[in-house]
Amino acid sequence: MEMKKPAIKSIPYEEFKDNETLESLLAEVNKERTNVLIGNLDDLINWGRSNSLWSLTFATSCCGIEFMAVGAARYDFARFGFEVTRNSPRQADLIMCAGTITHKMAPVLKRLYDQMAEPKYVVAVGGCAISGGPFKGSYHVLNGIDKIIPVDVYVPGCPPRPEAMLYGMMQLQRKVKAEKFLGGKNIHRKRSDAPKDPIIVTNVPAGDENKNEK
Amino acid sequence: MEVNFIDIKDFRETMLAHRRKGMDFLRELIGMDWQDDGLGAIYMLENSSTHENIEVAVRTLDRERPQLPSVSDIWMVAELYEREVYDFYGIEFTGHHDLRRLYLRNDWVGFPLRKDYDASEELNPVRMESEPVEEFQREYDIQDDREMAEIVEKLKILHYDQYVVNIGPQHPATHGVLHFHLSLEGEEVRKVDIRCGYIHRGIEKLCESRTYPQILPFTDRLDYLSAHQNRHALCMCIENAMEIGVSDRVQYIRTIMDELQRIDSHLLMYSCMAMDMGAITGFIYGFREREKILDIMEEVTGGRLIQNYYVIGGVQADITPGFAKKVKEYCNDQKIRIKEYYDLFVNNVIFRNRSIGVGVLSREDAISFGATGGTGRASGWACDVRKRHPYAMYGKVDFKEIVHTGGDCYTRLIVRLEEILESIGIIEQLIDNIPEGDYKTKTKPIIKLPEGRFSASVEGSRGEFGVFIESRGDKMPYRLKFRPTGLPLLAAAHKIMKGCKIADLITIGASLDYVIPDIDR
């Protein structure tokens, strides 16, 4: 039993670019044969997962406004299964990282990513998230979020057009369809990649008697 | 270069005297590094009733422990401005009661805007551990017999016997990445500690190593909802310095585009305010009309949100033939649609109860905080740059400056909605009479500004946006400073949030309408 081509309904397979990448992913997944039951179940699960990807409301700058426009009535990403955005990382499936990430924001982004439940995905939206964009070379800008978290889809532009964002999101859907969910063959992140040093909050201040504020 | 410095010893007296003479609006406080001529600051003051401007400069030659007297007790906005200068230049302001870094992490090494700053990766790598929490306020004060001011008092920023809540940096209602650290007593906010810098990109430092045309794209990315106006300010500043004349056609186009951008921004403000308060329908309606503006922008400039349209000496490309017709269609449509906003959201009883009388900013405070734009005008301060110092076509068109006196969240929204109608009025006066002419004056291939200091300011979508350039006759600026429209608003937020209910915090934040990348730069 083999997994099928990851297609999006009503858009022909050939109209997407990067089909080779997906096919190599599929080849890897299909290397070992699976029994019919689990294989069919995988297809079903992937169909469901890829059509209900909920994104974290995460925007730092300009691209965030375009992301809002993609969510509003005209472009409306709910049509493609990105039904709602979630404000808590614990309920989200993906981060659309829209905007520049600075030195001060980097640990926050990493923590948000760590807080999300598996399986999780990252889309880097815009030049800043991909490489630092126009601010490359600044003392306070991270040159690309892939330095701190793994990225699944890059959407270039400054800011990308809403159509480009939708295209990037659909590419992510196809990538989700090329995964083996049961059996843990192609889990997004291996256990060994998990942060070695868990976040331990040490600076919780004790109650104090110093009441010189008022 | 010729700068008239005031002696440090007379500085406080001079500033107090200016304040007594009615200079109540501190427009800008610009940190400077004159290398061998010391570190210092330039203060730009304005009289809010006569609109008279003066500049005061002060410096210190000590580079190890540069110290200047603080003016944060004279103008309230100086509290944040001085923290910014301390952050970038390491100048300690004596008498400032809470001198911490404003943008950078508090374990940052060095002061980035100094000319001798060491930008090596080893000193400041990307630190992945959380920022250490600073618990104490630092105050520098001169002791009796000592020359240098030392840290004299340690005051707790927040008390942990009160309930401490963090809002942000990742929070949908902060409109970007902003961090409110607040202590509560019951539901009432006792103290707010605002932490910004999560989107500080160091644009001002980058500008010092870019040529003037290369700087232009940065302005669009400061406050992306007044991209045109920001760029207008920089182009105007460079054109004035180089004495490049621009044709009437360009002035007309720029004025129309500025006003379209203003409507776009106000619509977004209305939409986001509706969304923050739970009325998602309001959001969808505001965005419906906003898309029509973006269509017009896209047709003329090629960009939706960030347009890169104005260039030095004119605009990138001429307007398209159907432009006037489309704009008129849009204006007629918008006048009808705006009534829907009132029916749907503004006159809604829940919204009115949550916003009338909430977060009141008085006129005196608005001036002292320098909170320009819709926020200032909602508090009764006529602060519109278009009226104060007319530029482009604003001296020749007839429009009313919307000024209300309520000062609360409701009034701030009403001011914006009424300004949309005024902007439509301005566009309608201009759109049929765009004169023929060049859309771009030819400039030299390499743009060099003469030696000197130049500044220009425009009315951005949410307040006065200013550009200050110190040039040494080079093709790159020696120092370039943008006056953020949002930082004074944030300073004011600090004050009006104190004592309000925590649920009102969101309403106040939405009504002040700040854009974080503009605050952080």
Image (cartoon, grey):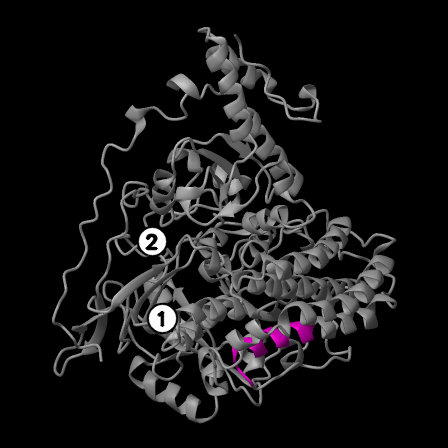
Helix, strand or loop at mark 1: helix
Residue B223 placement (x, y as % from top left): 56, 59
**Residue to which mark 2 is pinned:** B116
Residue positioned most to the front: A37
Question: Which chain is home to disc 1?
Answer: B
Q: Give the class, few, some or many, for how many residues have Cα within 10 Å of label 2's Cα (few <14, many ≥20).
A: few
Above-or-below relation of B24 to B57: below
Q: Name the main secondary structure of what is drawn in magenta.
A: helix
Residue B227 placement (x, y as % from top left): 62, 58
**Left or right of B131 on screen, residue B470:** right
Residue B418 is one of the magenta-drawn residues: yes
Indicate which disc, 1 or 2, sits on the residue closer to the N terminus: 1
Q: Give the class, few, some or many, for how many residues have Cα within 10 Å of label 1's Cα (few <14, many ≥20).
A: many
Residue B48 placement (x, y as % from top left): 54, 86
The region drawn magenta spans B406-419
Residue B251: name its quadrant.
bottom right
Q: How many marks?
A: 2
* Along the viewing direction, whichever of A40 and B143 lies nearer the viewer: A40
Asked whether the viewer can see residue B148, the reply is: yes
Above-or-below relation of A151 to B297: above
Question: Residues under labels 1 and 2: Cα distance?
Answer: 21 Å
Residue A48 is one of the magenta-drawn residues: no
Q: Any mark on residue B82, and which?
A: 1
Residue B20 placement (x, y as % from top left): 42, 93
Give the residue displayed 49% in from the left and 14% down from the top. A39
